[in-house]
Amino acid sequence: MTRRMALVFAAIGGFALSGLPSAGAGPGEPPAVQPARVAPADGPDREARQPQVAVDDRGRIYITFGVGNAVRCARSDDGGKTFEVAAVGSVDALSLGMRRGPRVAVAGASVVVSAVGGREGKGRDGDLLAWRSADGGKTWAGPSRVNAVAGSAREGLHGMAAGPEGSVFCTWLDLRSRQTEIYGARSSDGGATWEADRLIYRSPGGSVCQCCHPSVAYGPDGSLCVMWRNLIGGARDLYLARSADGGATFGSAEKLGKGTWPLTACPMDGGMVASGPGGLIETVWMREGSVFEARPGEPERRLGRGVQGWTAIGPGGPCSVWLAARPGRLLAEVPGQTNPITLADGANDPSVAAAPGGRGPVVAAWEAKGGGLFVARLDRPGPAATR
């Protein structure tokens, strides 16, 4: 069953504009922002949490989220003006909150949604599960278990990305060895089947950072990057591993940024990695209450005070979002703007995604402080999606 929700956007030329200067905005003034509701605070999905975004090569927008122990997915064919929401599946105990929650990716003709769930939850059990839709998110099959060892994904933190020719890759915090390690698994057929999982990284100290989600991104050429927060000698810095063969093997881990962060507790903030044309790799992450962007082998650049950063590579380059506080003001750095723009005054756990190959649309989504989910388009709108 689906339901159509009319969303209120500020529109120019019939397309939503969010995070772009409105008519009348003077030089140096913040752009006007008109976010749109995906899950209204007074509707059946009013308890929706942890939205994640994917955009396919036709420009269709997919947003997955959790409601209690149910996984849902919304699709927009018109650049974000309207959405249809469908039930994906449910589990006895869904991992949800603090970046625990479903992920969505589009691989060719398949839409894949993943989430961690178990019978008991709360870290006592949990497997990484994947559902697949072959009709654009209207109906769903599954779930399939991705992790080979039952319960090893019980920390509930994972990432997923889609690449060329139907490839999908999941990465997660794995506890099968009673230490927190980075594991991954690949599907080469749009999530219909999954290859055996494999160890990506084991910290020389035994565990990586125990409560920060990992992230993963495919480049247009099929190269793959996995990012996580490490734990070496008491420092909780971000590291990256690359694969040139679609995730079959990975190179050595490389630290991101020049600074370091000695910390005795987990900050619960894993950041995001994005990969674009020309071998561009962009990462956004938090250290000591500030959000940074960094590219491998280069010094980090401070975006500002805040937490829970996320990034995607769009037509004009990287688009990054973060919170000034959690919950708090949602900020975005977009190409063509000198200063960060404000998307919302009260938000939680934003995400942002772009179409494959660094194309638009670029869409951000977040939880509203008072309930419900919102989206905003960060790029200049182009042609409507084709069905």
Image (cartoon, rainbow, N blue to C red):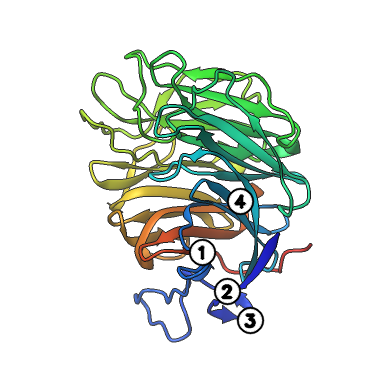
Closest to the camera, between mark 4 and mark 2, is 2
Query: Of residues 44 and 83, which is closer to you in this image?
Result: 44
Question: Which residue sits at x=68%, y=59%?
Answer: 59
How far across and how far down the image is residue 46, in percent? Answer: 47, 63
Disc 4 crowd, CA 10 A, few/some/many (<14, 14-19, 20+) = many
Name the mark on residue 13.
3
Name the mark on residue 7.
2
Closest to the camera, between mark 1 and mark 3, is 1
How far, Cα to Cα, is label 2 from label 1? 10 Å
* Residue 110 shown left or right of residue 256 in the figure: right
Closest to the camera, between mark 3 and mark 4, is 3
Tell me the SS state at disc 4: helix
Relative to 21, say whether 233 is above or below.
above
Labels 2 and 1 touching (C-beta < 8 A)? yes
Tell me the SS state at disc 3: loop
Q: Amino acid at mark 2?
A: Leu
Name the mark on residue 358.
4
Name the mark on residue 375.
1
How far across and how far down the image is residue 372, in percent? Answer: 46, 64
Closest to the camera, between mark 1 and mark 4, is 1
